[in-house]
Each structure stands twice: as C-alpha cells, then as structure tokens.
Amino acid sequence: MPSADLPCSTSLINEAELYFGPARPKACVVSLGTGMQPNILIKDKEMFRLKDSERFVALATGTELAHLLTLNDSRVRGCYHRYNPGKRNAKGDDWLKPIELYEWKKMSTMVSWTMDYFKEKGIKEDMTMCVNRLKAV
C-alpha cells in the first residue's frame, strides 16, 4: 500500500483504512515487495555522500518499515501476508540492490529471484494459507 513517494511512518493497515474506511473487514492483506535494500555503511568520521542520502530516502519511503509496523497489528493478525523476493549477496550478509518495477529489462532476473524465494522455508506454506484465504473471500 505505501507508495514510494510517501514517507512510511505508519502500518499498512492505517493506510488501507484511509482508502477503504476503518469499518471494512480485513479478510486478507497482501504486501508485495521487490527485495530488501542493501545495508548502508557510513565509515567513521566520513561525511556521507549524496548516493548515501538517496539510500536513506529509499529506506524511509520503502515498504519494509511499513511491513515491520504491520506485523504485530492486531487488526490483521492471521490474515497479513508479506512477500519480498530479494537476493542475498555472495557472502549472505547483505542484500543485492532490488530491481525496481520500472526496470522491465531485468524481469528475467526478478523471476529467478522470485522462484528462489518461493523455495525458502515457510514461504510455500504461507502462500498456501494466503491463497486459501483469498479463495474464501
């Protein structure tokens, strides 16, 4: 739900309620991401560069913070599902830069990352629960 141009300081549910109203029942809430942002490294006593500040903005306006705020929201307990297929670096201690939605020429890479993501522990089971909930709506 949060768009990339809006700072994220609230849960997805608060934003959904702005659009649909707080009285509407929430049968299934699905959040789709395009991968985690890489860690930001700022060296001691080094002024960060414009590139670094752009990454701060990306973190503040991305959906991962909204996801973390939504996780424990009692209004969607049991019906909230988050899918965020990113790719870890070779060491496994950080994330590769996400593929943005406008980067359509990299779609085959995104499909590959997504297929790998679906093989991660718990994702298939969660997706089955999500699909069953959506079918019941």
Image: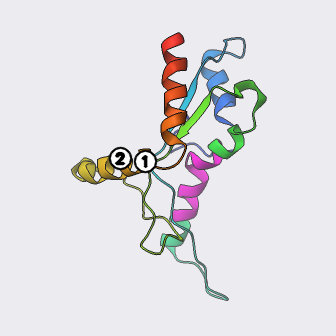
Q: What residue type is disc 2 on? A: Met
The answer, for residue 41, to whether it is visible in the render is yes
Against 9, residue 22 (above or below) is above
Q: In the figure, residue 42 lies in which quadrant?
A: bottom right
Nearest the camera: 116 or 82?
116
Query: Left or right: where does residue 63 sit relative to residue 95?
Result: right
Specify the quadrant that holds the N terminus: top right
Q: Nearer the viewer, mark 2 or mark 1?
A: 1
- Residue picked out by circle 1: 119
Answer whether labels 2 and 1 touch (C-beta < 8 Å). Answer: yes
Number of numbered discs: 2
Few, some or many residues within 10 Å of mark 2 (<14, 14–19, 20+):
few
Against 21, residue 91 (above or below) is below
Specify the quadrant that holds the C terminus: top right
Magenta span includes 9 = no
Q: Pinpoint residue 47: horizontal percent, then vertical percent.
A: 61, 83
Residue at far left of view: 105
The overriding secondary structure of the stretch rendered in magenta is: helix
Give the magenta part as a residue range.
55-66
User: Which residue is at 55% across, 27% downward?
Assistant: 129
- Residue picked out by circle 2: 115
User: Which residue is at 62% across, 30% downward?
Assistant: 80
Residue at far bottom of view: 45
User: Which residue is at 51% across, 60% downward?
Assistant: 37
Q: CA distance from mark 2 to mark 1?
A: 7 Å
Q: In the figure, residue 25 lies in which quadrant?
A: top right
Q: Pinpoint residue 72: horizontal percent, then vertical percent.
A: 75, 38
User: Which residue is at 55% across, 49% downward?
Assistant: 62
Few, some or many residues within 10 Å of mark 1 (<14, 14–19, 20+):
few
